[in-house]
Image (cartoon, rainbow, N blue to C red):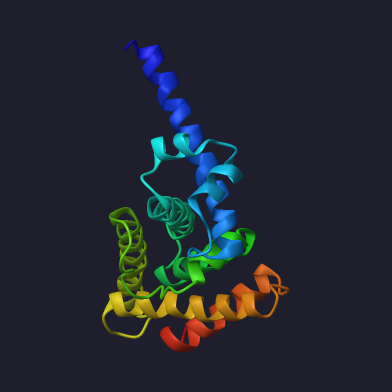
């Protein structure tokens, strides 16, 4: 196969994958995993069932792709926010704001992510890609937490535990936001989460 043909084939596969992931995200959010059929995902994406199976092995693989793709995107965004030259504590709060804003702008994924999951613990019975995305996110936050502890802005302790407390706090607030109809603006919501994180994790003298 020529390089041009290989490039065209890969581009087509990438387009199919994107269509399937977008369609699945919408359906999983509306109906839940159990009530979404693989045939529905194919129809929503505008592709045949055979084409879908040429990209993914089944519904579980599609679900893992939705989670992995979106988590990778949001963690990359939060990582950029935490890469500034500010203090580690300020970078954590900037990362939190970016994370919360992104989730409020992607309510379908937020609903999926909240359904039956605990953000602060290793997700079980899912694909390795999703586990890897989760680990990268926790490790990123924990590394900045360790800096904040060393700089004296965060209470001493295991930085991994601090990272998990941070994401658990985010989950509680985001779940309540969804239950209340998602009416509060992202900045107001991020402010309230930030205040809670400062009370729970940061030293008062900050």
Query: Horizontal and vertical percent for residue 85?
Result: 44, 58
Quarter where residue 134 is shown = bottom left
Q: Residue at x 35, y 79 (%)?
A: 162
Q: Residue at x 51, y 33 (%)?
A: 15
Residue ranking furthest to the top: 2
Residue ranking furthest to the right: 183
| As drawn, 45 above or below 93 | above
Query: Horizontal and vertical percent for residue 40?
Result: 56, 50
Q: Nearer the viewer, residue 179 or 56?
A: 56
Please state if 21 lies on the left or on the right of 148 as rendered.
Answer: right
Q: Nearer the viewer, residue 59 or 21?
A: 59
Query: Horizontal and vertical percent for residue 187?
Result: 66, 70
Asked if residue 141 shows in the view, the reply is: yes
Quarter occupied by the N terminus: top left
Q: Nearer the viewer, residue 17 or 161?
A: 17
Please state if 179 lies on the left or on the right of 119 as rendered.
Answer: right
Q: Residue at x 68, y 80 (%)?
A: 180
Please state if 177 lies on the left or on the right of 91 as rendered.
Answer: right
Query: Horizontal and vertical percent for residue 142?
Result: 32, 70
Quarter where residue 203 is shown = bottom left
Q: Residue at x 60, y 81 (%)?
A: 176
């Amino acid at each position: 196969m020529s390089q041009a043909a290989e490039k065209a084939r890969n581009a087509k596969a990438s387009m199919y994958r994107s269509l399937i992931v977008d369609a699945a995200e919408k359906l999983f959010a509306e109906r839940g995993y159990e009530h979404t059929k693989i045939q529905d995902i194919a129809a929503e994406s505008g592709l045949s069932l055979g084409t879908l199976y040429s990209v993914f092995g089944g519904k579980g693989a599609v679900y893992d792709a939705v989670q992995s793709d979106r988590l990778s995107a949001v963690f990359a965004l939060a990582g950029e926010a935490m890469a500034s030259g500010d203090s580690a504590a300020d970078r954590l709060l900037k990362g939190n704001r970016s994370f919360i804003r992104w989730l409020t702008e992607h309510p379908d994924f937020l609903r999926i992510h909240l359904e039956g999951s605990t953000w602060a613990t290793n997700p079980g019975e899912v694909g390795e890609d999703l586990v890897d995305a989760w680990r990268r996110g926790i490790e990123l936050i924990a590394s900045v937490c360790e800096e904040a502890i060393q700089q004296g802005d965060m209470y001493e302790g295991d930085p991994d535990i601090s990272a998990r407390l941070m994401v658990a706090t985010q989950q509680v607030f985001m779940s309540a936001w969804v239950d209340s109809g998602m009416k509060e603006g992202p900045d107001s919501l991020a402010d309230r989460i930030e205040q809670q994180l400062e009370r729970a994790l940061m030293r008062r003298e900050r």
